[in-house]
Amino acid sequence: MTESTYDLLRQLCGLSQQEAADFHGVRIDSIKSWCSDRRSAPQGAIDELRDLYAQIRKAADTLLEHVQSNIQVEDNGDRFFRIGLPHDDRDLRVCGFPTMSTCEASIALVAAQLPAGVPVKLVPRVRGAIPTAVISNWIRRRTAPRAELLTAANGAVMSAKVLHADEGAQASYTVELHTGDSVLTQSDTKLLKTDREARAWLGEEAQLRGFGTFKTTTVDERSEAAKKRDAEEVRKSRPSAGFLRRI
């Protein structure tokens, strides 16, 4: 069962969980968490999949036009469409795809749009004769850098925020690492029920990266009614003065 937007996009691109981990440069455990929505996938990772699928669609559109205009004919007069497949990983890289499965996802889009009743044959590609899907001129933006680089030991800096809203406590953090002329950034957000849960989650994320301390900003956007209700609950949970004297 698909439980997250990230997992939908991953499957749409044809990536296995391990291939997605290699694509983003993160651990397989992170991918499993994003797929199950146990942890929200960083927006950068989602944007990377959006970019990848846009390239898959673009390659499919170009290939479809070529295949349709070059229908093949058997010796017996039967017509068929012919689509090439990359020979190996090296040929795959020449074609611009990160994995064979993403190339196959592009070819599947082509096959789905060809006229019914005409067979489609998949054969090894031959440059200039038997085409395949090709991604060209793609300047990939990498917005989900390798998590193991973003640690306190490597000089990264972590900042966090807890936003109190009527729906609960939304915890978010950003980790930045300056490397020469560029900055590696990773962020995540999670909605929890209480401030304590939000700060505990931030503490766990900080501990994973070796941060003993980090700056946390607190923002309160609750309605006045919610603030009064929470204050009343806190008041009721405190022991009375008479109870304290008896102790």
Image (spheres, grey):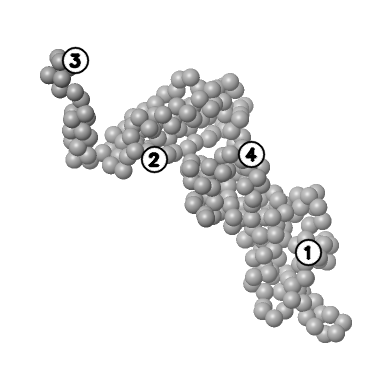
Q: Is residue 158 left or right of residue 198?
A: right
Q: Which residue is at the front of the view, 193 or 75?
A: 193
Disc 1 to disc 3, C-alpha distance: 82 Å
**Which amino acid type corresponds to the residue marked 2 in the rendered image?**
Leu
**Which amino acid type corresponds to the residue marked 4 in the rendered image?**
Gly
Q: Farthest residue to the right: give it.
A: 75
Q: Residues within 10 Å of mark 2 (few under 14, many from 20)?
A: some
Q: Residue 178: horizontal and vertical position, in percent?
A: 57, 27
Q: Residue 160: horizontal and vertical position, in percent?
A: 42, 29
Which labelled disc corresponds to residue 84? 1
Q: Residues within 10 Å of mark 3 (few under 14, many from 20)?
A: few
Q: Is residue 32 above or below residue 153?
A: below
**Which amino acid type corresponds to the residue marked 1 in the rendered image?**
Gly
Find numbered disc 4 in the image and state the secondary structure of the residue it sits on.
Answer: loop
Disc 1 to disc 2, C-alpha distance: 47 Å
Disc 2 to disc 3, C-alpha distance: 38 Å
- Disc 1 versus disc 2: nearer the observer: 2
Residue depicted at x 33% and y 34%: 194
Which labelled disc corresponds to residue 191? 2
Residue depicted at x 61% and y 40%: 28
- Sequence order check, earlier mark of 4 and 2: 4
The residue that label 3 is drawn on is 247
Q: Farthest residue to the front: give it.
A: 246
The residue that label 4 is drawn on is 25
